[in-house]
Image (cartoon, rainbow, N blue to C red):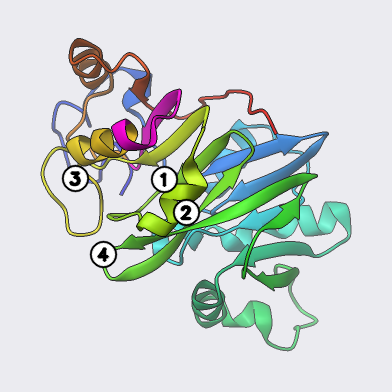
Amino acid sequence: MGVPTLTCHCRVCSSTDPHDKRLRPSILLAHNGQNAVIDTTPDFRFQAMRAKIERLDAILFTHAHADHILGFDDIRPFNLRQKSALPVYASPETIARLKQTFSYVFEAPTPYSTVPQVVVHPIDGPFEVIGTRIVPVPARHGTMGVLGFRFGGAAYLTDFSVVPESSKALLADLDDLILDALRDEPHPMHQTVDQALALVRELKPRRAWFTHIAHELPHAETNARLLAAGYSNVALAYDGLRFEVHV
């Protein structure tokens, strides 16, 4: 729901620490002057302006929950500027939900208004965007199937509760692992901090970043707790975080 969360006045939602201001989770991959975004959140327009994105070359979707797709319509300026449709990569299930939610995009075009122009690519294995090999990593979000993505030495897995054993083999020898860690209290569709730490211990990435963070976790205090517990390579991600990935 983002932090601050509407109607909430807890200490995290009321925090003056800019790291405690969290838009819905998404990341941008930039390589050789090209850009691919993973998920178009309801905050996508502001996120794209803040990151000064001048062009967009591909969209990848993890799954079709509202907080990951509802900014989809805001890709239109990139269509207009680039005079081309954007490739969209997603599972068949996510594509079906996109077509249901944004039916006007996939119906016969209207002459009276612009709509997003896309070319849909169902994901059935590794693929390449912006000159980078992308490896889909299947996971479970409660009972729902979702996809994470590996790109070179990094992987992004938001919104999941379980990573199957078959997927763990795709996450070996990572420099950076970005993964779901919602809060300390158990949730049927997300990892807790302790569950995320257990996965970090098992997969042994050189660095780990927690994302999809609810307002129960204050940024500075949680990072200090992780450090005191011996996890010097683990921290909460934050809006605007950037790092280089070896591909």
**In x, y percent, where is residue 235?**
34, 22
Residue under pointer 1: 24
Residue at 35%, 54% in the rendered image: 163
Residue at 23%, 19% in the rendered image: 226
The quarter in which the C terminus is drawn is: top right
Residue under pointer 3: 7
Label at residue 42: 2
Q: Of helix, strand and loop, which one carries label 2?
A: loop
Asked if 27 appears above or below 89 in the picture, the reply is: above
Instruction: Point out the stretch of residues depicted in magenta.
Output: 201-212
User: Magenta stretch containing residue 41, yes or no?
Assistant: no
Q: Of helix, strand and loop, which one carries label 1?
A: loop
**Kind of residue indicated by mark 4:** Gly
Dot 3 or dot 4, earlier in sequence:
3
Instruction: Specify few, some or many for label 1: CA neighbours under 10 Å numbering under 14, 14-19, or 20 or more.
Output: many
Residue at 49%, 77% in the rendered image: 93
> In this rendering, which labeled residue sits more in front, label 3 or label 1?
1
> In this rendering, which labeled residue sits more in front, label 3 or label 2?
2
Residue under pointer 4: 142
Does the CB distance between marks 2 and 4 fall below 8 Å? no
**Kind of residue indicated by mark 3:** Thr
Dot 1 or dot 2, earlier in sequence:
1
> In this rendering, which labeled residue sits more in front, label 1 or label 2?
1
Q: Real-space Cα distance between discs 1 and 2?
A: 7 Å
Residue extending farthest bottom:
108
Instruction: Specify few, some or many for label 3: CA neighbours under 10 Å numbering under 14, 14-19, or 20 or more.
Output: few
**In x, y percent, where is residue 114?**
74, 70
**In x, y percent, where is residue 127?**
71, 58
Dot 4 or dot 1, earlier in sequence:
1
> In this rendering, which labeled residue sits more in front, label 4 or label 1?
4
Tell which of 140 and 210 is nearer to you.
Answer: 140
Dot 3 or dot 1, earlier in sequence:
3
